[in-house]
Image: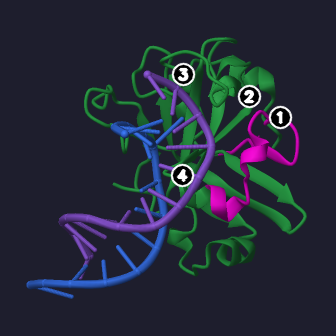
Chain colours: A green, B purple, C blue
Amino acid sequence: MSGIISEGFYRSFSTLELAQKLLGMELVHETAEGTCSGIIVETEAYLHNDRACHAFSGITPRNRPMFGPAGFAYVYQIYGIHYCFNMVSGPDGCGEAVLIRALEPLLGIDLMQARRGKNSITDLCSGPGKLVQAMGIRKMQSCESLAYPPLYVRNGNLTPEIHTTTRIGIGKGKDEHLPYRFYIKGSKFISKP
DNA sequence: GTAGGGATAATCT
DNA sequence: GATTATCCCTACG
């Protein structure tokens, strides 16, 4: 049986625990064009006392969702052209989140190929900007609940073997050495080995 | 197959 | 005015 993950689940674990528990679960997005989904194979954790975290320097209009309760979406634009999708986590008001970095495409692969303009299955969702484009997630959806359609997570039946390493794209002096990146060992769908 | 750099604009100082 | 939790195209073996 696969059920939708409730807001209570997101609140029951620390950000670091949640980032690992999400691996193997299915992210689903229902749109007018069709339904897309994929298995979460790569995540990164951003903690409140972590210099790489958007919430580190306090609350701003952009990062406000991060300071709300766990189980909501935080979507932001990066490098002017790409978007990243996060799930808010940690205690209410804390400012923590889990970045979803890669998916293994499952449902709506035709639609993903059309949105991405690529055919290779491993090139549809193998990066934070790519998966947002493939899934049709938009900035407007920042602040939406992840416990109800159209955007939600379903339970997986996998207990994947997890590999832990350092995060991608973090500049120097920003806690780039912290082991806050997690991915499913051996997956061909991650953004980088 | 790998490496390097440009694109491009919201956000914050 | 600097920075950025990225992607893609081009050049070269």
Count of numbered labels shown in the rendering: 4
* Chain of the residue under the numbered disc 4 shown in the image: A
- In percent of the image, x 67 and y 26: which residue is there? A61
Label 4's element? Answer: helix
Q: Is residue A39 above or below residue A33?
A: above
Circle nearer the viewer, 4 or 3: 3
Q: Where does residue B1 sit, x and y in percent of width and height? A: 26, 76
The residue where tag 3 is placed is: A55
Mark 2–mark 3 distance (CA, rounded to whole Å): 17 Å
Q: Secondary structure at mark 3?
A: loop
Numbered label attached to residue A128: 4
Q: Are marks 2 and 1 in contact (CB under 8 Å)?
A: yes
Residue A99 place in picture, x, y as percent: 55, 39
Q: Secondary structure at mark 1?
A: loop
**What are the residue bounds of the magenta stretch?**
A132-157
Amino acid type, callout 1: Ala
Residue ID for mark 1: A147
| 10 Å crowding of disc 4: few (<14), some (14-19), many (20+) | many
The tag earlier along the polypeptide, 4 or 1, is 4
**Spatial distance from mark 1 to mark 3, Cα to Cα?**
23 Å
Q: Which residue is mark 2?
A: A71
